Amino acid sequence: MPRKQFDLIVFDWDGTLMNSTATIVKCIQSAAKDVGLTPPTDAAASHVIGLGLAEAMQHIMPDIEPGQYQRMVERYRYHFMTDVHELVLFDGVRAMLAELKQEGYFLAVATGMGRVGLNRSLNATGLLSVFDATRCADETFSKPHPAMLQELTRELGQDLRRTVMIGDTTHDLQMAMNAGAGGIAVEYGAHPVAQLETCNSLFSAQNVAQLRDWLRDNA
């Protein structure tokens, strides 16, 4: 059996493990309506998925009054927590994670979500014990800054050169490049394939089954 290429596999959450892109877009648009703003388009709202919440709101609506950003964040959190029951894992995710765990990989999550939201999602899906470590955007620098991956590798005693980041956005893949880690794109999430192709990924998976097969044969 060939020697493993990676020891630590880090997953983005929304749009990579959790089928939540449409719900997040709807929550951003609802938050804008709540504070009296014109809601962003689906494409604009999906582009900021993966960023920290404050950064996402500033990116998507750069011209509003600074005080409105906090109101947007508060209303987004309200809608997201209300709609969390709508979120489900992509088909095949649970089996893939169980297989990777069985093979002895360290598993982690690096997400633009806040800690409260991630913990609620992990508990709801029964995956809390699967991951060896997790990092959220309200605990450190937001993607594409490399801090999440740097902190996860330090916490778990791992090497960034033997770490791979898997995500559905350019924010995820640019974070991997900035950290000196490997990057794998998934094409079923928030960002268009053409954007993902600019990030020099090791592999681009059209679905979870392809991702699982690649990891089994190459990771």
Image (cartoon, rainbow, N blue to C red):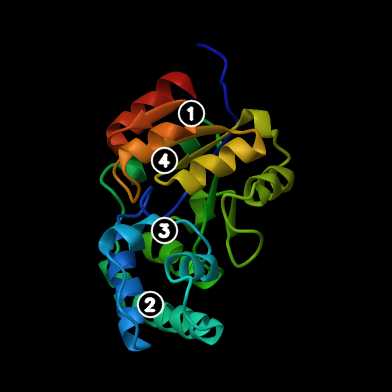
Whether residue 20 is visible here, answered yes or no, is no
Q: CA distance from mark 2 to mark 1?
A: 35 Å
First in sequence: mark 1 or mark 4? 4
- Residue at mark 4: 98
- Count neighbours of disc 3 (C-alpha within 10 A) and say few if under 14, some if 14 to 19, many if 20 or more: many
Q: CA distance from mark 1 to mark 4?
A: 28 Å
- Find residue 9 and report its horizontal and vertical position in percent: 53, 37
Q: Up-down: is 15 above or below 5?
A: below
Q: Nearer the viewer, mark 4 or mark 3?
A: 3
First in sequence: mark 3 or mark 1? 3
What residue is rendered at 34% in x and 83% in y? Answer: 37
Disc 3 element? loop
- Residue at mark 2: 81
* Residue type, numbered disc 3: Ile
First in sequence: mark 3 or mark 2? 3
- Find residue 209 and report its horizontal and vertical position in percent: 28, 33
What residue is rendered at 38% in x and 40% in y? Answer: 195
Q: CA distance from mark 3 to mark 1?
A: 20 Å
Whether residue 17 is visible here, answered yes or no, is yes
Disc 1 element? loop
Disc 4 element? helix
Q: CA distance from mark 4 to mark 3?
A: 26 Å
- Residue at mark 3: 49
Q: Nearer the viewer, mark 4 or mark 2?
A: 2
